[in-house]
Image (cartoon, rainbow, N blue to C red):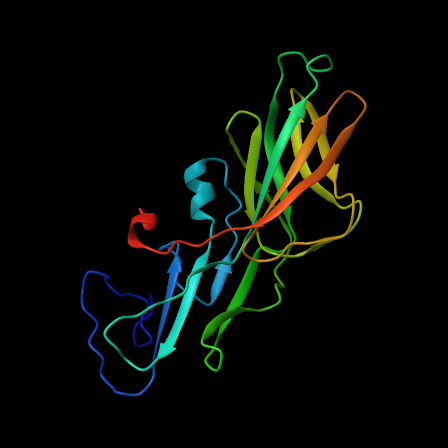
Amino acid sequence: MEENGLYRWEPIRRLRWEKVGRCELIAWYPYDITNPFIYNLHIDQSDETKLKAADLINGYWYDVPKDYVDIPMKHRMSLVTIVYHVGTADYPNKDISEPQVYSKHNSVRFFRDQDQGKFVMNTPSGNPDWVQACKHDDGMFSAIVIPGSYIKDEVFLKFKIGDNNFNAKMKMPTDFEEGKRYIYKLDVGKDKVELTRISIDNMTGWTNEEELK
């Protein structure tokens, strides 16, 4: 959290307001971000701890000091979850390994809009990059990417089965938006790799201290 321009504030300590005019507070997760105005994509998300650390939730408060501060927090990245099936007849006793998800950008900047009282994401302009995804729940893998626009037939996934390399392409132009999860089904057989979008839903941000633990 930023306090008086310094990127450090201990939440167990009380805030002392030094003026009666409007003040601003910026809060963000994960805690290891040193500059709240710049997010750099974590490309290694190969386990659940690293996947969670790649998330970005931030919020902005600009108001007159009062007895309490309510900072609305929001997920800013896009979460991709792949539910996959490997044909057992084509690849007996084999599983997907080294899954990667394509992010159209590897960094993005934010700016504060005092009129609206919120943090706003700039149009991402960083270079594209591949994210090492996290395998989980027996037949799924997930990765967090920076929102961006994908074109039809653009390679979106890369993975291996045994020593063989595979990729899966976008079926249609798709715009990833901040704070949304995109769920796809991936079917892999000897002569086909098919990627189908299942659903899109909103990722809810945390609203109390218990959800931070």
Image location (x, y in percent) of residue 198: 67, 40
x and y, in percent, of residue 90 in the image: 73, 15
Figure quadrant of residue 33: bottom left
Horizontally, is 49 left or right of 10 in the view? Answer: right
Task: Name the quarter where the N terminus is drawn.
Answer: bottom left
Give the quadrant of residue 12: bottom left
Q: Residue at x 23, y 74 (%)?
A: 67
* Residue 82 appears left or right of 212: right
Q: Residue at x 33, y 50 (%)?
A: 212
**Count of numbered marks:** 0
Where's residue 89, x and y in %?
72, 12
x%, y% of residue 84? 64, 29
Q: Give the camera-side residue of 179 and 40.
A: 179
- Going 51% across and 68% down the picture, which residue do you hit? 110
Q: Is residue 105 above or below residue 171?
A: below
Q: Residue at x 53, y 46 (%)?
A: 43
Which is nearer the eye, 99 or 116?
A: 116
Q: Is residue 144 above or below residue 168?
A: below
